[in-house]
Image (cartoon, grey):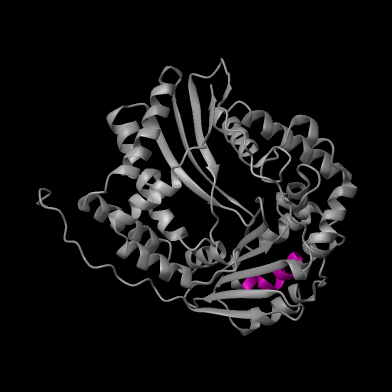
Amino acid sequence: MTDRTTAPRVFPFPPLPAVNLTVQTLSNGIPCYCISNTQINLLRMDIRIQAGSYYQTRTSVARACIKLLTEGTEKHSSEEISEIIDYSGGYFETRCERDFAVISIYFPSSSAHGIFPLLQEMLTQATFQEDKIKILKQKIKNNLAINLEKTSYVGYCHLTQHIFGEKHPYGATATMENIDTFSREDIVQFYHKYYHAGNMRIFLAGNINDDILDMMDHTLGKINHTASPLSEYKAPPSADTSPIHVSKQTSMQASIYLGKKFHTLTHPRWNEYAVLNTLLGGYFGSRLMTNIREDKGLAYNIYSRIVPLVHDGMFYIHADVNKQQVALAIQEIYSEMNVLKEQLVDQHELTTLKNYMYGSLLRNFDGVFSQIEQLMDVNDFKLSMNHFEQKTNIIKSIQASTLRDLAQMMFTPGFVEVVVG
């Protein structure tokens, strides 16, 4: 019978798995980052286009553009596109992030001859039919109506509006009124301005061979290359840090957000701040989880997060608590930040934190599909995979005194407080 009174042995940190990364450049200049494993018969392709909501001039245009790519091209109807993807055994999804629009597709390598031409069509010959736009607008409204009933969604919207400004692309949010303001012409203009080879990167993982690369170059490598400049929004930092309380009588709980502007991934001490954030609220054994959930029973879940964006960044803490316990929860959150500013982390807790973070990092490098996702995360910021080697060195070597010094710089006054409930 297993002896559970003795902890398992602790082994030294193993090295991160080697990543078999190669970079191909298509005929039109699109860089293609490839991580190959010929032992699997699948491919994962992600096309990242610098065409997120940051670049739209009207609300929801960026989302509408990426979502409507599967709703018809000059050669195929939406039904035919679905049939091609299903027949190929593929799984297809699109999403609109703040900085990037993303196409992700998993498919057998033997189906590349059908998938690649279809992707080329979507990226060059999308038709954006009026009836499809009307249906999509209604879907966006339906989803928004559901989200507006969630205190966490409303709270996050108020947080970003307050941190960045409601007219800033990172702070602007959709409303029932502004969803109707964009037109087909807005989508078409956005499509032609941002959906071109000079604004795309391809990430490919799986069973990659010369035939796959040739097929990709003869399809996606034929997309026109233009060099239209990307607009960048300049805004002064928000000076208003007054608390925000949005009453929601029907809700039994209240959502709490505390946040502020912060560094982005290119900051030289980003990996050190990531360790501090994990200690505060980034995993189940964090200070916030131990205090707010385990000791006080104020919330089922509480976490802190640092969000790197291409043009900016933010740090925030979120918890859903009983309405009567909001003041106590906020007090305890600030208390935990103050403790980290004043006291050194003991060696046992620091060792546990390091083991957790390194184990998570190893898990994120388990297999080529996970590895390509890690590459995308840093490539967005023009960083290389060396970022993770630096991260491992920080996790192994960071000291309690360094974390205290970082806390004194990170947990300064000026947090935006949002309570919805």
Hey, which quadrant is residue 50 in on the image? bottom right
Identify the residue at horizontal 59%, vertical 71% (top origin). Answer: 204
The stretch drawn in magenta includes residue 146 = no
Residue closest to the eye, 324 or 71? 324
Question: Which secondary structure class fits the magenta region best?
Answer: helix
Q: Can residue 116 be found in the magenta stretch?
A: yes
Decide: is 395 above or below 304.
below
Q: Is residue 301 above or below residue 410?
A: above
39 lies above or below 199: below
Image spot of residue 36 (x, y percent): 52, 77
Residue located farthest toward the right when viewing the structure as drawn? 185
Q: Please name the residue shown 27% across and 44% down the image.
A: 343
Judged left or right of residue 144, residue 155 is left
> How many marks do you count on the picture?
0
Image location of residue 13, percent across then percent down: 28, 67
Which residue is nearer to you in this view: 205 or 418? 418
Residue 286 visible in the shown view? no
Nearest the eye: 393 or 9: 393
Q: Position of residue 175 (x, y in %)?
A: 73, 32
Q: Choose top left, top right, bottom left or bottom right for residue 58.
A: top right
Q: Residue at x 67, y 45 (%)?
A: 170
Magenta range is 110-119
Q: Is residue 394 left or right of residue 50?
A: left
Q: Position of 86 compared to 375: left or right?
A: right
